[in-house]
Image (cartoon, helix red, strand yellow):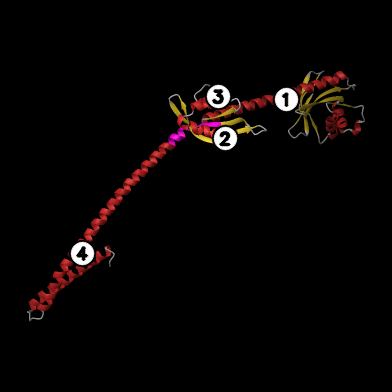
Amino acid sequence: SCWMLDETKKVLECRDLYQLQQKAHQSGAEIRKDQYAGFFKKLLREGRYNAVSTNLEYERDPFIRDYMVPKGVQSFLTSAIMLNGEFVGIVGYATIAARVEWKADDIKFVDQLAGLISLTLLNRERMQTLETLRQNEMYLSKAQQVSKTGHWNLNIPLGSLLWSDEACSIFGVESGYRLSLDEFFVRVHPDDRSFVMSAWDAALKGAPYRITHRIIIGDHEKWIEERAEIERNASGEPITAIGTMQDITERIITMQELDRYRHHLEEMIYERTKELEAAKMEAESANQAKSAFLSNMSHEIRTPMNAIISFAHLIRQDSLTVKQEDYLDKLSDAARHLLLIINDILDLSKIEANKL
């Protein structure tokens, strides 16, 4: 039989029990730690294998009394299944109806079975780890393709570069292409080459390496952003650099277009402001001309009006007919009314000239 610990590590579950005489398989039985604590302790204490027999005083042993005897088990030989140094289960070898003295071959047989199961579990764990690594590599590769980000590793003493597939794609070379550091600098845009080399020299001396520059691919250029960390030996000499590169050409082009649009807007605003200022000055000039015209005209009209009112007053000193008095009253009323209008116009001119 084969028994494995459950997730709680407190129950041994029977995964398969083969009965030789009936040639039948069973499963589902349990050996619980809280019921058979002594059995668990002996498993861990005895090491690789443990033998239990009903010739012991089974009244004192709950496992023999409550588990083996009711099932008719006379002798029970177990070997521990270990995984990475941890106890995970047992292989059991039991006899029914007759007790036996376990021989070296029996112990070796059960121990070999336990070893094979341990090896199987270890291989399964390794396969699961490898599968997880493959999936992670696939996700990383897909993420790099989506973000247009590659990574690289530089052996500084040898000057040899190892690139990821996406890094090769960014530089327009086949996947797995070995590019030297000198070849890399050749592909850097001539106008940026001295800047990149200076930044790299500073990084070798301890400065952070995070730069943006252009590269030449065929007959066109790309913008890339690079970051790197440098590992040093015990003497402090740089030995390895690990970095990333991202194709940011679309981002740069978008930023340049936004800058051009912003400059265009600024020029439009400047021209419009000049037009508004000119229109304002023109309006103010026209308004001043209007105010001056009204003021001058008001003064010119008020002078004869004063004469009309004054002479009307003098005429009243003479003897007049009723009809002449009526005409004179109407003349005086109209003159005074007109004078009030002229005064209002003068006040309006003073308001506009801030002189009221």
Residue 316, located in which quarter of the rendered image? bottom left
Amino acid type, mark 2: Ala
Q: Residue 122 carries which label?
A: 1
Q: What element carries label 4?
A: helix
Over which residues does the magenta segment extend?
A: 244-254
- Circle 1: element type: helix
- Mark drawn on residue 203: 2
Q: Is 209 one of the magenta-colored residues? A: no
Give the total of numbered labels.
4
Q: In which quarter of the image is residue 289?
A: bottom left
Quick check: can you spot residue 170?
Answer: no
Q: Which mark is residue 295?
A: 4
Label 3: few (<14), some or many (≥20) within 10 Å? Answer: some
Position in image of residue 237 (x %, y %): 63, 32
Residue 313 pos. (x, y %)? 13, 77
Q: How far apart are marks 2 and 3 (CA)?
A: 18 Å
Crowding around mark 2 (Cα neighbors within 10 Å: few <14, some 14 to 19, many 20+) is some
Where does residue 146 sit, x and y in percent of width and height?
52, 30
Examine the rendering and report whether any part of residue 264 can be seen. yes
Marked residue nearer the N-terminal end (1 or 3)? 1
Going by the image, does 31 lie left or right of 193? right
Q: Do the residues labelled 1 and 4 touch (CB within 8 Å)?
A: no
Dot placed on the residue nearer the N-terminal end, 2 or 3: 3
Q: Are marks 1 and 3 in contact (CB under 8 Å)?
A: no
SS of the residue at dot 3?
A: strand
Cα–Cα gap, marks 2 and 4? 79 Å
